[in-house]
Amino acid sequence: NAGVMQNPRHLVRRRGQEARLRCSPMKGHSHVYWYRQLPEEGLKFMVYLQKENIIDESGMPKERFSAEFPKEGPSILRIQQVVRGDSAAYFCASSPVGWNEQFFGPGTRLTVL
Amino acid sequence: GESVGLHLPTLSVQEGDNSIINCAYSNSASDYFIWYKQESGKGPQFIIDIRSNMDKRQGQRVTVLLNKTVKHLSLQIAATQPGDSAVYFCADTFGNEKLTFGTGTRLTIIP
């Protein structure tokens, strides 16, 4: 049973470009969460999605950030017009039911030059 | 949700000894707690969880203790091994709300 998969593992973008991060949940999991982690810090919740629905986006910046989890395919976290402050590790997690027992992917490390 | 804090940012333990990592939470309504282990360059790995109707839960070499009176959570690792070196996070939630993570404790195992 494959775990949560994220790609790319490393992503380098120049200021102003778009970053697109993908997450495939564990088989049988329909709940997906995105977190951001700065070096030497804990994880900060960004958004919680189920198939075709955003359940909680209270941790998402109001501008430039968006997330989706379509009926088919992976969940996508999109960051438009990236700035240096967006550099961080972005982790996706999935669970079989809401909020509890989340399993994390390996993360995407975004570097904005 | 309110922040979950940790008493110590770093902890060094001799290989073979037991480790205790502590966590304080401030929200008395929190009803579910999880411990995660994060190795360098990797995603957090689920270790063990506990619900607020329990005060102790045991896994393989790990035990989580919950003291609701003082809002304190601890993770005990028995007979630590080099592979236990990592950052350990506690997280909490209440009702159907998002998980709130603490800042983490870095555990270093001394050979």
Image: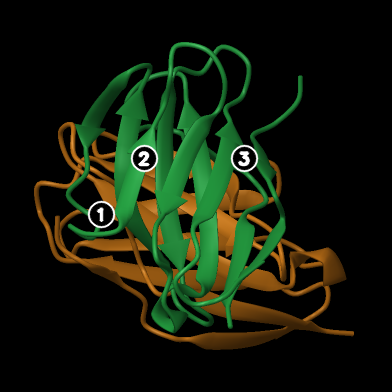
Chain colours: A green, B orange
Q: Where is residue B7 in the image (x, y as percent from the top left)?
A: 36, 82
Camera-nearest residue between B109 and B91: B91
Which of the image's four quarters has the C terminus of chain B?
Answer: bottom right
- Chain letter of mark 2 equals A
| Of A88 and A83, the residue lying toward us | A83
Quadrant into which the N terminus of chain B falls: bottom left
Q: Which residue carries the number 2 mark?
A: A67
Whichever of labels 1 and 2 marks the residue nearer the N terminus, that label is 1
- Disc 1 crowd rating (10 Å Cα; few below 14, some 14-19, many 20+) is some
User: Residues under labels 1 and 2: Cα distance?
Assistant: 9 Å
- Residue indicated by mark 3: B59
**SS of the residue under disc 3:** loop
Mark 3 or 2, closer to the camera? 2
- Few, some or many C-alpha atoms within 10 Å of disc 2 (few <14, some 14-19, many ≥20)? many
Q: Mark 1 points at which residue?
A: A60
Report crowding for label 3: few under 14, some 14 to 19, many 20 or more residues within 10 A (C-alpha).
Answer: few
| Left or right placement of residue A56 versus residue A91 in this view | left
A50 or B111: which is nearer to us?
Answer: A50
Examine the rendered structure and indicate whether residue A91 appears above or below residue A53. Answer: below
Discs 3 and 2 lie in a common subunit: no
Q: Mark 1 lies on which chain?
A: A
Q: Residue at x 55, y 47 (%)?
A: A21
In three-dimensional space, the C-alpha distance between marks 1 and 3, rounded to whole angstroms, equals: 35 Å
Q: Position of residue B40 (x, y in %)?
A: 72, 71
Identify the residue shown where x is 44% and y is 71%: A16
Left or right: A27, with B3 as reference point:
right
Looking at numbered disc 1 in the image, what kind of residue is underneath it?
Answer: Met
Q: Position of residue B78 (x, y in %)?
A: 70, 60
**Residue B55 appearing in the image:** no
Q: Distance between the residues labelled 3 and 2?
A: 35 Å
**Position of B14 relative to A4 (above/below):** below
User: Circles 1 and 2: CB distance less than 8 Å?
Assistant: yes
